[in-house]
Amino acid sequence: MIRSKHGIEVPTTLAEWCDPSRAALLIYDMQIGICSQVKGADAIIERTAAALDAARSHGMRVAFTRHLSLPRAWMGTTQLRTAMAWQRKDDPDSVEPWFLPDAPATAIVPELAPRADEAVFDKLTMSAFDSTSLGFALHDCGICTVVVAGIAMEIGIEPTVRQATDNGFTAILLSDACGFGNREARDRSLATLDFIGETIVTDTAAFCAALQAL
């Protein structure tokens, strides 16, 4: 650790950042209906499962997000416009709410099923910090580092890790455990995060090794 003259500690190694006393694993939108749309999702599930097993075995808190749809009567301008774009529809009355709370597509894939002592945050937005109590829960538990894996990098993970900084957290991105729908868009997201420099970008093997080193 580096300590400032005011007593603020700044971790200098991945193991220090991943200390379960200060870090939590966030598994982003690994839902049946999302994974089924992403090429290579099986590999992302496998790597995310490895990170999840390592976090659980070292007592790290784990949280999941699920993207939800509201019933059609509650889909306003923003939600209708987004649904029309995703579903390639010209008529707002033709869109379907894909991710209603009890729909099979909304469930987390069985390989990553949350345990009873793990949190699940449902959201309507792309960033996991908007429309959820994730930030409050992390701060309330004294967590300052969020390790992120899931789908999709260029859609929701980039805004989540960028907003993590704005909410007073350091984000660690497991880049090989983040799926994507468009490779070029994924690459732009990674390039942006690298340019800004706030997010620590690593991979699943390094994360597991960092925990093992504690």
Image (spheres, grey):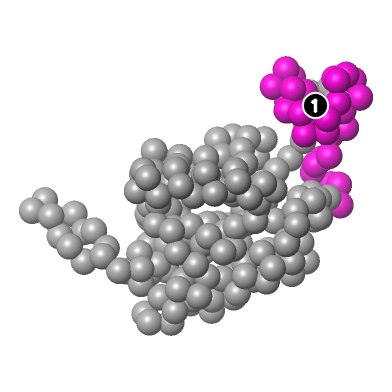
Left or right of 10 in this view: 183: right
Which residue is drawn at the image coordinates 44% and 43% (left, top)?
192
Residue 190: where, in percent of width, then height?
49, 49
Q: Can residue 177 be seen in this snapshot?
A: yes
Left or right of 156 in this view: 37: right
Question: As rendered, which of 77 and 36 lies closer to the eye?
Answer: 36
**What span is colored magenta in the figure?**
76-104
Residue 100: where, in percent of width, then height?
82, 40
Which residue is drawn at the image coordinates 83% and 30% (left, top)?
88
Q: Quadrant of residue 56?
A: bottom right
Q: Is residue 53 above or below residue 85?
A: below
Which residue is drawn at the image coordinates 21% and 66% (left, top)?
1
Q: Is residue 55 above or below residue 87?
A: below
Q: Can residue 133 be seen in this snapshot?
A: no
Tell me the kind of residue under disc 1.
Met
Q: Confirm whether the magenta stretch covers residue 142.
A: no
Residue that numbered label 1 is attached to: 84
Left or right of 89 in this view: 135: left
Left or right of 147 in this view: 112: right
Question: As rendered, which of 124 and 182 lies closer to the eye?
Answer: 182
Residue 154: where, in percent of width, then height?
59, 44
Q: Is residue 92 above or below residue 60?
A: above
Question: As rendered, which of 119 and 52 lies closer to the eye?
Answer: 52
Residue 84: where, in percent of width, then height?
80, 26
Q: Confirm whether the magenta stretch covers residue 89.
A: yes
Q: Count the marks.
A: 1
Q: Quadrant of residue 98?
A: top right
Looking at the rendered image, the quarter that the C terminus falls into is: bottom left
